[in-house]
Image (cartoon, rainbow, N blue to C red):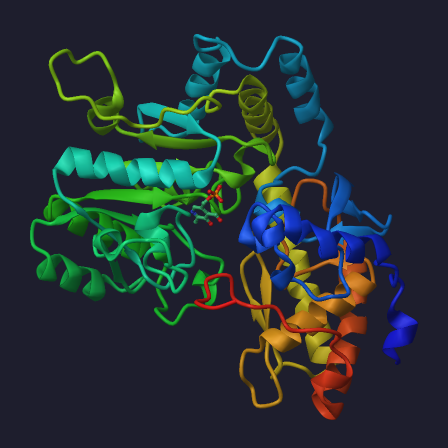
Amino acid sequence: MKKQILRKINNFSKSNKYRNSIHQLIPGGAHTYSKGDDQFPILSPAAISHGKGAYVWDIDGNKYLDCSMGLTSISLGHAYEPVLDRVRAELEKGVNFQRPSVIEMETAEKFLSLVPQHDMIKFAKNGSIVTTAAVKLARAFTGRKLVAFPGDHPFYSYDDWFIGTTDCNKGVPNEFSELSVTFKSCDIDSLKQLFNKYPGQIACVICEPEKNTCSGCNCQQSPEVFLKEAIDLSHQHGALFIIDEMVSGFKSAFPGSMTKYGLKPDLATWGKGIANGFSFCALTGTKEIMELGGITNEGEEKVFLISTTHGGETHALAAAIATIDVFLNNSVIEHNQIIGNLFLTKCAELINKLEMNQYVDIIQCSWLPALNFRDKKGKISSAFRTLIMQEMFGQGVFFQGYLCPSFCHTPSDIDILIDALEGSLEVYKCALNEGIEKYLVGPEVKPVFRKHL
Ligand SMILES: Cc1ncc(COP(=O)(O)O)c(C=O)c1O
């Protein structure tokens, strides 16, 4: 089969114009580096005009089945009506006032009813704000400086305490990054070594509860085992434990992995899917710690926790309430994981049929299934991932190597995805045999956290 026959989408003319001018206006051309041009092949959309359900349309009018779902923030579907209805009603009433809107209390009660381990909550517009606030609170509570996290987890915040530890650390003074120390995820001994190396100095451990790679992890144990030990160990050493449910929240379980595994972290951070793409994130925690950020304990030193003009924007809170209600009244997690499992089963059948097991790995995670792509020598290859993206876009599927299932994805969407994947893997086979240069148009995608452009 020839790739020319497979490709349905060839017109990226408006996208090309957009690509050529956006970098003059916006550094990076986008508002997260993960949306940037260096993360996509040339033959792909540069900007999206709108989305509905599981589909998005680019500025040239091309339609795509969406597998990425707004950096995994769209848990229900694009422009999901029950959420929009609640948001519209709130918009009519105004979005920001000089005193808190009444919806703040309603949202706080609703969210906390999902997290019985925690008593108090603060809202924010971005995940980085709540993870940074959690770190600050832990430092204030313990009077210690160091923050520990798994060095092999990709992202916790765009703030200096995290970015300073990546290759992309220009602009961050060493004095800041030296306050962050790392251990190996799932490896309790490496965390023990860290506590022994810095006795009485670590304020907190912050950690994602599980990754979609956990199922195929070398550690061969459930995340629950590590997390329970890590929480106990942190407490023995007088440090707080923060679970970052930004990605796992409203996906791995409802509300998150801490429920699934029966964990009681001191603080938890939430974002992405919890308001179906609207800008609503949250920090939850126990009263003893969270109330440090309060103003009622007269005489105590004040901790300037989260304080932002837009943190309580009413329609985003309404979106969170509506999203939570949809999750409470429907089997959203079950639906999404059925879709994820269908993708996994059909991918396995396809890869077997095409005899490509040595080139394509399947990450067996029902809530965020993914594929890894390998070159002829068996090495994980971003060039081949780029080729797959290029071919999937060409067949109307917005695919970057993973599927974020939403309540709007249907089994027939998975059929569409698998058909496109079959066509793309045929091209992949040709590229393995004849050389990737012959098939990939433009450069391969680059790592987000790289030292040089
Ligand atoms: C695990 C994790 N924590 C925190 C963040 C930061 O969230 P935001 O991009 O909303 O600032 C992200 C973003 O991808 C994340 O994946």
Decide which of 219, 201 is in the foreground and name it.
201
> Which residue is depicted at the point 72% across and 84% down?
437
Residue 349 in the image: above or below residue 40: below
Residue 9: x and y in percent read 87, 61
Decide which of 172, 83 is in the foreground and name it.
172
User: Residue 15 falls in which quadrant of the image?
Assistant: bottom right
> Which residue is depicted at the point 39% across and 65% down?
167
In the image: residue 134, left or right of residue 144 = right
Decide which of 428, 113 is in the foreground and name it.
428
Residue 313: x and y in percent read 52, 20
Decide which of 365, 163 is in the foreground and name it.
163
Work out which quarter of the rendered image holds the N terminus and state it: bottom right
Extreme residue toward the front, this view: 24
Residue 184: x and y in percent read 29, 65
> Which residue is depicted at the point 61% across and 62% down?
39
User: Residue 305 falls in which quadrant of the image?
Assistant: top left
Q: Tell me if I can see residue 227 in this picture.
A: yes
